[in-house]
Amino acid sequence: MTHPTSLYKPPSLPHPFFSRIQSSSNSYFSSSNQTSKVTLFPFTSPSIPTMNTKMMLPSLNRTTHPIFTASSSSSEFSPCIRRNSSTVPNFSPLPITHKPLHISSLRGRLTPSENKKSPTSTVCNAYEAGQPRPLDINIGEQAAQKIKIGIYFATWWALNVVFNIYNKKVLNAFPYPWLTSTLSLACGSLMMLVSWATRVADAPRVDSEFLKSLLPVAIAHTIGHVAATVSMSKVAVSFTHIIKSGEPAFSVLVSGLVLGETFPLPVYLSLLPIIGGCALAAITELNFNVIGFMGAMVSNLAFVFRNIFSKKGMKGKSISGMNYYACLSIMSLLILTPFAIAVEGPQMWAAGWQNAVAQIGPNFVWWVAAQSIFYHLYNQVSYMSLDQISPLTFSVGNTMKRISVIVSSIIIFHTPIQPVNALGAAIAIFGTFLYSQAKL
């Protein structure tokens, strides 16, 4: 049987190394009983991790193997080969395969402890062609992440729907939106203070610089929260959320006038169905109210400024979404309380409370507590979800949230709606979805 290495033919190029091989092919190997150990060293570069690979070759027929046909007294070898004589073969014969090897992954060791020992070491995995390849992706972790995001969305939508239902019930019996807004912020602030005190949640580390950057965000959040509550006290919940779906139009307008930002043409085109849908829904609204309409518009404008101030103030700061909203609620409560007392006052609150309890009964107290608790929870979950999902996914979820609130409020409160009004709402919401796609 012919040895595979005997099939090797030197190239015809006049290279000095192969000329030396051909000229001394009979003078080097005088003995065919010795064995050789050959160590291969690849060329290295300072910027490339070094990987030493040792190949053990069995005893070869040195009269026919051309790579060993240099003079035995000469030490001139290829720069990639080092020869060591040995009388005992030190190798394990491996089966010969003609299948190529493919690299499946390449990663460096980045842990500090390993970097101290081998700062340039690299782990390389390979698999043989035709063999099962191990997956680098942990399917279990991906499935768990999808389930987690699904739970965030379901919880966010459910809490928002429950809040809007109880908030509307409270406002129908107790038409004092300034106090209702104050109680929502007070309940959330109290819940977070208790959580920090009992070590259920880690308290954030805040400084004067953080509070200074949070102040304009809290002012805008307070205005937007009160304006939305005033709107829902005058009009149907569905109408308020249809108008609030026009927030992207305010975002583009404010960003262009205040920040000087410009957007691609698809972003501006996506505003046409938003504006047209909101206008169609407002014109065909059966229970239209100017205060309710203006409240929703002011809420849109305030929340746009809140987002702008939040992006500017939070650059370079590390705080969780839950703690960020907790700090925002506490500061908004401090801002809102004196204005609520000045606009409505304790006397109006006392008279209105007695009248509501007389009409509804003890359930009214539960309604107030429920709308306050669920307001904080749904906002907290929305801020927490931003830590887990991308802005595009969040915007799509926000659009679906408005749909769930509008549909559920129409069903529960039996809100009369015309087909043209429903068409306007659908166009506005679809435009919001197009805006989120074009923007991101």
Image: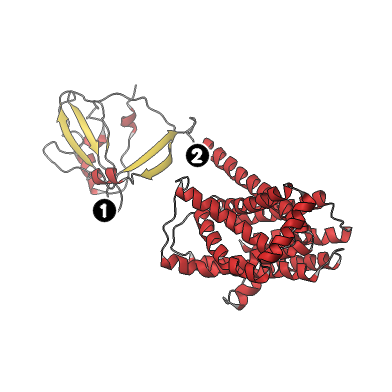
- The amino acid type of the residue labelled 1 equals Pro
Q: Residues within 10 Å of mark 2 (few under 14, many from 20)?
A: few
On-image quarter of the C terminus: bottom right
Whether 89 is drawn above or below 67: the answer is above
Whether 112 is drawn above or below 242: the answer is above
On-image quarter of the N terminus: top left
Q: Position of residue 24 (x, y in %)?
A: 18, 38
Closest to the camera, between mark 2 and mark 1, is 2
Task: Answer with left or right where residue 227 lies relative to residue 63.
Answer: right
In the displayed image of the protein, which residue is found farthest to the left? 73
Q: Position of residue 114 (x, y in %)?
A: 28, 43
Q: Position of residue 160 (x, y in %)?
A: 67, 51
Q: Name the residue: 78% across, 61% down.
A: 239
- The amino acid type of the residue labelled 2 equals Ile
Q: Residues within 10 Å of mark 1 (few under 14, many from 20)?
A: few
Q: Name the residue: 57% across, 42% down.
A: 148
Q: Nearer the viewer, residue 61 or 227?
A: 227
Residue under label 2, please give it.
Answer: 137
Whether 376 is drawn above or below 4: the answer is below
Looking at marks 2 and 1 on the same chain, the residue that comes earlier in the sequence is marked by 1
- Please tell me whether mark 1 sits on a helix, a strand or a loop: loop
Q: How many numbered circles does the render carry?
A: 2
